[in-house]
Image (tube, grey):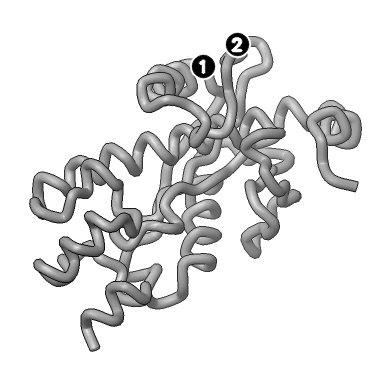
Amino acid sequence: MPDSLCSLQEEFGSVWELAAGTDEAGRGPLAGDVVAAAVILDPQNPVSGLRDSKKLSARRRELLFDEILHKAKAAAVARASVEEIDRINILQASLLAMQRAVDALGISPPFVFVDGNRCPAWSYSSRAVVKGDSLVPAIAAASILAKVTRDREMLELDAVYPGYGFAQHKGYPTPVHLEALRKLGPCPEHRRSYAPVADLLK
């Protein structure tokens, strides 16, 4: 039976409010690190309006980013580098980034909800939840922290490597980005293992 918010709350009971949630941002882009975040929310100091970061406006994400950091019991952001993505692949790099984020919380959570269908190979009691950013508030909070952090970093990369349009497409393979790649070639932040970049390097 597919997970639902009610079924998850009933299944995990008291652990639900103490659990961490983790999610990543940046699996699809051709450039930049994959960024993950982990959050333990405070049930006594709730954050309203949490949902999948992709369903929120950029302005709303920015506001929630600050509120989450202010109200959460613990929150951390981590990453896996472009070099790690190229070496171990994006799936393993995403799992590594999530493990680093949970490890960085400063509080060892009794349970971790992981967005997606796979958990990192770690010692935490955990469960992968498909579409978890729409079902588990702690995952939704983590998705917001990860996406805002990564989007900000892509704005910085746009200034360092002008011409690619990183500020607009955030590294995703849009027609504008692919055309810039053909004209300028890859920059040091492009993922060499991704086909559009690898094809140019052949």
Q: Which mark, residue 127?
A: none
Q: Residue at x 45, y 16 (%)?
A: 67
Disc 1 marks a residue whose amino acid type is: Lys
Up-down: is 116 above or below 132? Answer: below
Q: SS for tag 1? A: helix
Other residues around mark 2 within 10 Å, as few (<14) / some (14–19) / many (≥20)? few
Residue 106 seen by the camera: no
Up-down: is 148 above or below 181? Answer: above
Q: Horizontally, is 85 left or right of 4 in the view?
A: left
Q: Quadrant of the C terminus?
A: bottom left
Q: Horizontally, is 106 left or right of 66 in the view?
A: right
Disc 2 marks a residue whose amino acid type is: Asn
Q: Residue 60 versus residue 141: which sits nearer the camera?
A: 60
Residue 108 seen by the camera: yes
Q: SS for tag 2? A: loop
In the rendered image, which residue does mark 1 sit on?
71
**Residue 117 place in picture, x, y as percent:** 69, 57
Q: Residue at x 70, y 48 (%)?
A: 130
| Labels 1 and 2 touching (C-beta < 8 A) | yes
In the rendered image, which residue does mark 2 sit on?
45
Q: How many labels does the image show?
A: 2
**Residue 22 place in picture, x, y as percent:** 58, 43
Q: Residue at x 45, y 75 (%)?
A: 88
Q: Residue 74 versus residue 26: which sits nearer the camera?
A: 26
Q: Residue 45 versus residue 200: which sits nearer the camera?
A: 200
**Residue 28 place in picture, x, y as percent:** 43, 58
User: What distance separates the C-alpha of mark 1 from that of mark 2?
Assistant: 6 Å
